[in-house]
């Protein structure tokens, strides 16, 4: 059998390293560790085998998770002779009327001072219908009810930022979908259930799904920006990247 290698071992999570060790890796401290058989997680490659990812890198991610492997290998897979250029797209995400404005302002001021352009995703309406973060009492807030946040958003727009509409409420109805029912935690356009083992079951579009329903949420969100005296963004980012053909 031809030898198969796993790449970028140091970027894999502890879970992945444990799985690699179980597959008989000979040198886990090196960037490329020879394996006797392919592991479950990570990216694998061989002499006659294209680089392949054995997980879905965007099903969830953190700043140091396995999606970094995918990002670093993207040109290897699509354009292997391309000269390396280490660039990134920086986006601040899940900004909404419940946020600590001082933190957002501080980040924006730093990026501006360094001459770094950035995008930022804004959720115009905050919803906590089950009171998950408010001792059981439901909470709701619109952009126009958060004037300090609007001031900061205007600062960001004038200092290298591009605003993106990141859903309308970034949650669905008064239902857990799949975590808390709260803005920025849950899916808005796609029904997702968390299993007992913490994996996710992607059921399908929410029951209201239609072009008119999805468009109505987007229109209502745009109206929220207008009510707060902000120009509604021309870019829409689907919450948790999960939607139907209607979104």
Image: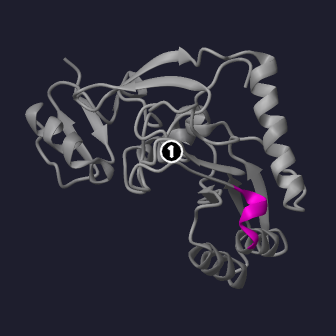
Camera-nearest residue between 34 and 187: 187
Quadrant in which the C terminus is drawn: top right
- Any magenta on residue 114? no
Residue 110, image x, y percentages: 64, 82
- Name, please, the residue furthest toward the front: 137
Going 74% across and 19% down the picture, which residue do you hit?
A: 246
Is residue 213 left or right of 40 when viewed as pictured?
A: right
Which region of the structure is painted magenta? 142-147
Q: Principal SS element in the magenta part?
A: helix
The answer to whether residue 158 is seen in the rendering is yes
Residue 237, image x, y percentages: 69, 41
Residue 19, image x, y percentages: 16, 35
Tag count in the figure?
Answer: 1
Q: Name the image quarter holding residue 144.
A: bottom right
Residue 112, image x, y percentages: 72, 79
SS type, badge 1:
loop
Q: Name the image quarter holding residue 227.
A: bottom right
The answer to whether residue 80 is seen in the rendering is no
Camera-nearest residue between 128 and 219: 128
* Residue for badge 1: 182
- Any magenta on residue 144? yes
Going 39% across and 24% down the picture, which residue do you hit?
A: 193
């Amino acid at each position: 059998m031809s030898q198969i290698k796993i790449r970028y071992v140091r970027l894999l999570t502890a879970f992945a390293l444990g799985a690699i060790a179980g597959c008989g890796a000979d040198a886990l401290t090196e960037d490329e560790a020879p394996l006797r058989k392919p592991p479950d997680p990570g990216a694998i490659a061989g002499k006659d085998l294209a680089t392949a990812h054995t997980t879905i890198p965007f099903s969830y991610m953190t700043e140091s998770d396995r999606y970094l492997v995918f990002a670093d290998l993207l040109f290897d897979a699509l354009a292997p002779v391309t000269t390396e250029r280490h660039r990134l797209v920086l986006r601040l995400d899940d900004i909404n009327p419940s946020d600590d404005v001082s933190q957002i302002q501080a980040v924006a001021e730093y990026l501006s001072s360094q001459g770094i352009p950035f995008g930022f995703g804004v959720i115009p309406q905050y919803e906590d219908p089950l009171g998950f973060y408010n001792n059981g009492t439901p909470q709701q807030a619109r952009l126009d009810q958060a004037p300090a946040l609007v001031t900061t958003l205007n600062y960001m727009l004038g200092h290298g930022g591009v605003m993106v509409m990141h859903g309308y409420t970034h949650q669905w109805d008064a239902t857990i979908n799949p975590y808390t029912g709260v803005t920025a935690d849950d899916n808005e356009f796609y029904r997702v259930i968390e299993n007992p083992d913490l994996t996710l079951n992607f059921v399908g579009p929410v029951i209201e799904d239609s072009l008119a329903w999805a468009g109505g949420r987007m229109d209502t969100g745009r109206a929220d920006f207008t009510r707060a005296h902000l120009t509604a963004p021309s870019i829409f980012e689907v919450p948790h990247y999960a939607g139907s053909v209607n979104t």
